[in-house]
Amino acid sequence: MLIIHLLLASALAQEPGAPAEAQPPPVQVFPGALNPQLSFNGLFLAGAQWDDGALTTPHLGGEAGEAAFPGAGETFGTGLNVQEMELQLRAAVDPYFNANVVLAIPGTEGIEVEEGYVQLVSIPRTTITIGKIKEAFGRENLTHTHGLLTIDKSLVGQALLGGEGLNDVGVNAAFLLPTPWYSELLVSADRGSHEGLFNSGKPEGFGYLAHWKNLFEASYETSIELGLSGAAGLNDGDGLSKLGGVDVTVKSHGRGSRQFNRLIWQSEFMLLDREGADARTLGGVYSTVEYSLSSRVWLGGRYDYLGIAGTEADKAQAATAIFVFAPTEFSAFRIQAQRQWAPGGHTVDSVVGQLNFTIGAHPAHSY
Amino acid sequence: MTFLLSIFLSANAALATVNVVTTTQDLAALANAVGGSAVTADYLARGDLDPHFIDAKPSFMVKLSKADLVLSVGMDLEVGWLPGLLTGARNPKITPGSAGNLDLSGCVTKIEVPTGMIDRSRGDLHPGGNPHYWLNPENGRKMARAIAGRLAAIDPGHAGEYTKNLATFEAQLTAKQAQWATKMAPLKGTNVVGYHSTFDYFCAVYGLNVIGFVEPKPGIPPTPAHTLRVGQAAKAARVRWIFVEPYKNPADARPLATLSGAPALLLPTSVGAEPEIKTYFDLFDAIVLKVAG
């Protein structure tokens, strides 16, 4: 019946008097046209760090991401460093699947598969993603390092999800719900190999996650996004680890020539409840604000608080200010000044500059 | 069985209305002109905004999830935001290559297709050429024909209506083109400077000479050295205007205006750039009025 219908539709379309169907563009042959889209991003750092007021020993090419004191956030030390280099390959596999592979080189040594997945895109209102995936827990966890406002991740994100974030091999299904506003429900299961969260080593030790994302438009220029996240899985202490999160993002931009004057406020709350051995409850929040003075210059800041429902030894705070100059979409300079108040009364001060560049295919902008 | 089959086919031959979603307001205006009451057309990028830099808002995915047909300018104009929206829409009807996805750059006459090595040292170059082709009214005719053709293919029940609407649009366009050409004729050979290459199609059609740009390279903000160079050239060439898009910062053109003695002229680039510009004809009426009076 479908074939008959299609044939008839085709015949009707070719009736005398019907407008001619648009002709396809002339065939252009590009070398490598069927190759994946390639893009490469590099992040170089130069900075200075003072632990309790003393300048840390300069080092070249050292590992980034070590905490100055127990319970403090990861820092970059003093000297020059490579924060990360990232190679991304994207392509349609066939009419049914897209594929995306992100290979990351943290520092200057070793290659990690940061992401590598195929995504089924041929089902109405649904995508199914299989592979190694940055999991949809809040907003920061989904953001690649070069896409963050600040050079480092939030204290609560680092403390609860780890420096690499919640990122594991699994499968997820995301449904676009039939609501007048944007509402997406995502559910996923992963293999439960995340160190510190879901790493029981047991056959049944999967990690499970759900994320509900909603976006409401106050106007064309202003939107409010509200997300709820929950994850659970067996931990290495023979107990259950449960993670919850709420994220709120407000974005607004101007009209016409003020299009590039943007204000973005993003905040997240996360809470971990770990049962079994080393049971603990710990939560925290961060809040960022950024304002674009123009398409090239923006200012921002972040406040972190870690220690909600935790002990005195868990309590840490940070205040961060950042200035960004982006000559084009493909390069940016950032200067970040930060003070951390670490557990035990320690302070960590740092000033870090970052060069961020991208070559290759035009990056897709996430919202 | 035959009776049931005929009911099924007749019910499906004509869609109630075709839900068209376009990337720009210009394309929505053309879809409305050609589709008439048989379509509902909505857009993503409002006409006062730079179509290169539109936020990929998830709410756009909701619009696209319900679309029967998506129309795009193509030539990488929407490359930073449309691909992600199409994936996020989860609508197999509008995936690239399907009948519900029409990239209109395939049917128009293009200019400034770059030759030689293409990389970003030449700025934010579009490998397929200048993507602002809707500012040539003859391209508007080609776009309308392509839209009508695609609408008829996916909604054959309304093919006659699309044909009729297209004929009306083309007749109006022909008449308007004669008016615009008459008004613009005295300006043939006038030298102008553009901010970006947005008005190059318009200038080519009406014989205005674009002798330089505020931007040193496509998408690159002006530098003092470039401004000085173009300002001197513009003064020597007795440039009449500096054309500025509504989404550009007019202050960026002021140093050049001071150097060259030519005023900055804010021109709409798209339907919706100003509240009274509601149709494709309104857009050219507004541009011609500002330039030729």
Image (tube, coloured by chain):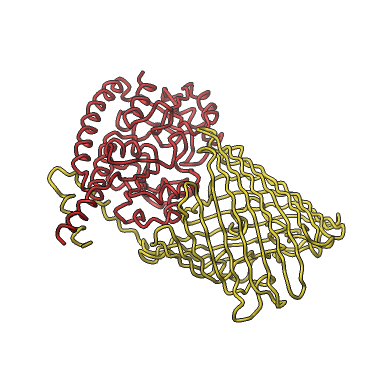
Q: Quadrant of residue A105?
A: bottom right
Q: Position of residue A346 (x, y in %)?
A: 85, 58
Q: Position of residue A136 (x, y in %)?
A: 57, 60
Q: Position of residue A194 (x, y in %)?
A: 64, 71
Up the image or down, B143 lies above or below A356; here it is above
Q: Position of residue A52 (x, y in %)?
A: 86, 56
Nearest the eye: A282 or B192? A282
Q: Residue at x 54, y 50 (%)?
A: A214
Up the image or down, B144 lies above or below A125; here it is above
Chain A representation colour = yellow
Nearest the eye: A307 or B182? A307
Say left or right for A27 vs A91. left
Q: Residue at x 37, y 47 (%)?
A: B75
Quadrant assignment for the N terminus of chain B: bottom left
Up the image or down, A267 lies above or below A90; here it is above
Nearest the eye: A26 or B7? B7
Q: Which chain is red?
A: B
